[in-house]
Structure formats: structure tokens, C-alpha cells
Image: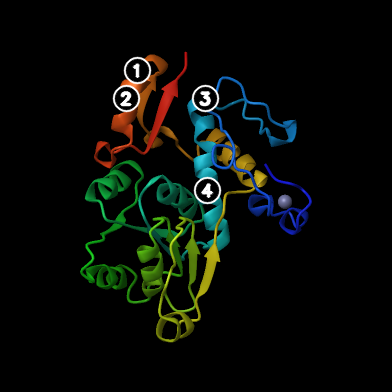
Amino acid sequence: MNCQRCFACRRGNSNCCEDLKVLGVMMDGGMTERLLLPASKLHPANKLSLEQCALVETLAIGCHAVNRGHPVAGETVLIIGAGPIGLSVSEFTRLAGARTILMDLSEQRLNFARQKMGIADTILSTGDGQELEMLRRITGGDLPQVTVDATGSNKSMGNAVNYCGFTGRLVFVGITQAEVTFPHAPVMHRRELTILASRNALPADFTRIIRLIEEGKIDTRPWITHQSNFEDLIVAFPEWIKPETGVIKAMVHVN
Ligand SMILES: [Zn+2]
């Protein structure tokens, strides 16, 4: 919910309205029987199933992050973090024609990305410095043009500058309340990096994603790893929040 009056809204950047109230974050969200919204907030999606509709917002986060870093065909993108946000970024780097490399601490998540999302290049982050060497090897020594950090870890975000190629773009799509630090002169300045934040998404991103799903260019089936009906939700929910159960997105069928 955005004010339509502030500097950001007047410039068309309603995603970062100065008085933004995100449903389910700053105000109550959709986990309710009825939700009253202005008609201008609705996006027609008559050809989509309810499951597909439920994934549009998740995908919009990745869509906007990729728009911020704007990789073009032939460029290489490193995505750090293979959770739902990182995976949604990967859908749009693929559509941009960029080469995608995915890095994560969890072999289970990387396995999922290789097998279900078709991401061939993955790097297991072990914290021993091998990641950078592997990244150099995969990129022929150049390092990626675009790096997207989708971890929400301030440590990872500070370290991400080391993975950026010279004149590269670094997009922070995960968020942290902690300070992010990195060496300026030897890394950020020397490589003339551009650092970008990516917050929420724009209405046009929703429209685009609905069309991409309709056209079959995004397949939402791999996204839905767990399902439950409403009656079993109380039993299922504690399992869904455990990382080892491999949840990407879980769907509750109300009827
Ligand atoms: Zn505003």
C-alpha cells in the first residue's frame, strides 16, 4: 500500500514509497477469510491456477532484482543464496539469456536447483576460500558481471564484493538489520563496482510475470514442494519451517 504522493511514488517507484505498508509485514496480510483492497491493486490473472497466482509475488521479487542488475544475454550472474528469493532471481536471469551460477551453504538446496530448476553451475560455499577459486574457474578468470546476494546475511553481503568482476554490479535483494562492511579501496573502488538495493517490485513486474506463466515461460511446478489441506495445516506447519525438510514453497488448499 503506497501513498501516491511522496517523492518515490511521484517518480513511479511505488515499490519504495516513503510511507510503504506491505501487506503481511507492516499491516495484516492475506492469512484471513476476507481482504479489502483498492481495485487498482488487482492484477487480472484469469488463465492462472490458484497455485500459480500464489507464486506471482515471490517471482516479482526476483524479477525486480534482475531488472536492477539488468544482465544482458551473454553476461554471467552469480546468485548467492538458493532459497526462494535466489531461485526467483534465477528464473529472470535465465529469461534474460544470462549464464547463471548459484552459490549456497546447503548441498541439498543446490541439488534441488540443479535437478528441478536446471541450473548447471553451482558452488557449495564452505567458508574456506575455495568458492572464489571455483568462481574464477567457471568464469574463465573474469568473475561475474552481475552478483545478486539473496541471503539476508550481512556477512555474506559484505563478502560479496570479492566475487564481483571489474566494473560489475552488485544487487542486495536480501535484507539485514546489521551493518554491511567491505574493503573500499582494494576491492570496491579498484573494481569500480556499482552497488544496488532491490526492494519489493513494481505493478508492471506482476503483469509481466502473469504473462510469462501464461505463456509457459515460467513453470511454477518445481516451486511447490509441499502441500496441505486446511485441516492438516496445524500438524504440517512446524515441519515446513525446518530447512531440512527442503521447503521452497508450501501451498494450503482451503477447500
Ligand atoms: Zn509514497
Question: Label 3's element?
Answer: helix
Q: Are the residues flagged by discs 1 and 2 in contact, CB closer than 8 Å?
A: yes
How far apart in space, not on screen, are marks 4 and 3 (Cα)?
19 Å
Q: Image point 38% across, 14% down: which residue? A: 231
Q: Are the residues flagged by discs 4 and 2 in contact, CB closer than 8 Å?
A: no
| Residue under numbered circle 4 | 61
In the rendered structure, which disc, 1 or 4, sits on the residue that comes first in sequence?
4
Q: Please tell me whether residue 19 is drawn above or below residue 127 in the rendered image.
A: above
Q: Is residue 128 left or right of residue 72?
A: left
Q: Are the residues flagged by discs 1 and 3 in contact, CB closer than 8 Å?
A: no
Mark 1 closeness class: few <14, some 14–19, many ≥20 residues within 10 Å: few
In x, y percent, where is residue 70? 55, 62
In the rendered structure, which disc, 4 or 3, sits on the residue that comes first in sequence?
3
How far apart in space, not on screen, are marks 1 and 2 (Cα)?
6 Å
| Residue under numbered circle 3 | 50
Q: Identify residue type, mark 3.
A: Leu
Q: Is residue 64 left or right of residue 125?
A: right
Q: Identify residue type, mark 4.
A: Ile
Pick the residue in front: 223 or 172.
172
How far apart in space, not on screen, are marks 4 and 2 (Cα)?
26 Å
Q: Identify residue type, mark 1.
A: Asp
| Residue under numbered circle 2 | 236
Q: Identify residue type, mark 2.
A: Ala
Q: Are the residues flagged by discs 3 and 2 in contact, CB closer than 8 Å?
A: no
How far apart in space, not on screen, are marks 1 and 3 (Cα)?
19 Å
| Residue under numbered circle 1 | 232
